[in-house]
Image (tube, grey):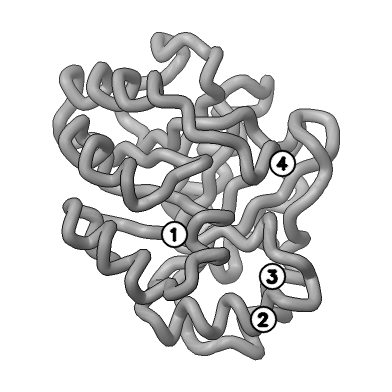
Amino acid sequence: MRIAGSLWSVPVADQLQALSAAIDDGLNVVHWDSSDGVFAAAGGFTPEAAASLLQQAPSVESEAHLMMHDPLPVIPAWAQFCTAIAIPVEIEAAFRAVDLIATLGVQPCLAISPQTDLTRLPDDIPVLLMSVQPGQAGSAFQPVTIDRVAQLHELDPTRLLGVDGGIAPAHCADLARAGARWIVSGTSLFTAPSPREWLSQCKRSGFEPT
């Protein structure tokens, strides 16, 4: 089970402290969002900004979600410190990006927006299902995402399925039962009074940090 924390909604001045505290409390994966302002609302991190924070924080695994129409130019920089990179399935360059990521020795993943038909997905790549519109940090979780996870899990129980957006501990049990083995949370995790307790609640639901 994989739990990743997204700093998208954390004020810049607070990011290092928030990340370090969450890592100390048991967070093992940080999720770096990066949007070009075209595919989704502008925001997130450059690879340089993410690397700078990582140099100052305790050791942690990284993954990236590149919400861009053309992520190809920046993939090599993210691949230097990420173990996984997610690319929107909706973009024209999606499968060229997947091939490049794999060539660089990083796990490629395909992110899919709430309104996109699941038949757009190939059979052999991990999937990150968006439970909010891409780039809309802080939006409410869309419960229909649980059904979408279950549909994909039924087709292939071995494929890694993740969910990103609006996730709180209350959602974790339903997501785990549906077949999700990876969640990304930002606002709920980083505004929790105790990230340690937040992570503990998810762990009890089947999402043990890895």
Q: From the viewer's perspective, is 23 left or right of 208?
A: right
Q: Which residue is mark 2?
A: 16
Q: Which mark is in front, 1 or 3?
A: 1
Measure the alpha-carbon separation of dots 3 and 4.
16 Å
Q: Which mark is in front, 3 or 4?
A: 3
Which numbered disc, 1 or 4, marks the residue that appears first in the sequence?
Answer: 1
Measure the alpha-carbon separation of dots 1 and 4.
21 Å
Q: Secondary structure at mark 2?
A: helix
Which numbered disc, 3 or 4, marks the residue that appears first in the sequence?
Answer: 3
* Visible residue check, residue 133: yes
Q: Residue furthest front?
A: 193
- What mark, if any, has residue 4 been given in the picture? 1
Quadrant of res 115: top right
- What mark, if any, has residue 134 been given in the picture? none
Q: Which residue is mark 4?
A: 71
Q: Residues within 10 Å of mark 2 (few under 14, many from 20)?
A: some
Measure the alpha-carbon separation of dots 3 and 2.
10 Å
Q: Which residue is mark 3?
A: 50
The residue drawn where x is 36% and y is 76% is 196
Q: Residues within 10 Å of mark 3 (few under 14, many from 20)?
A: many
Q: Which mark is in front, 1 or 4?
A: 1
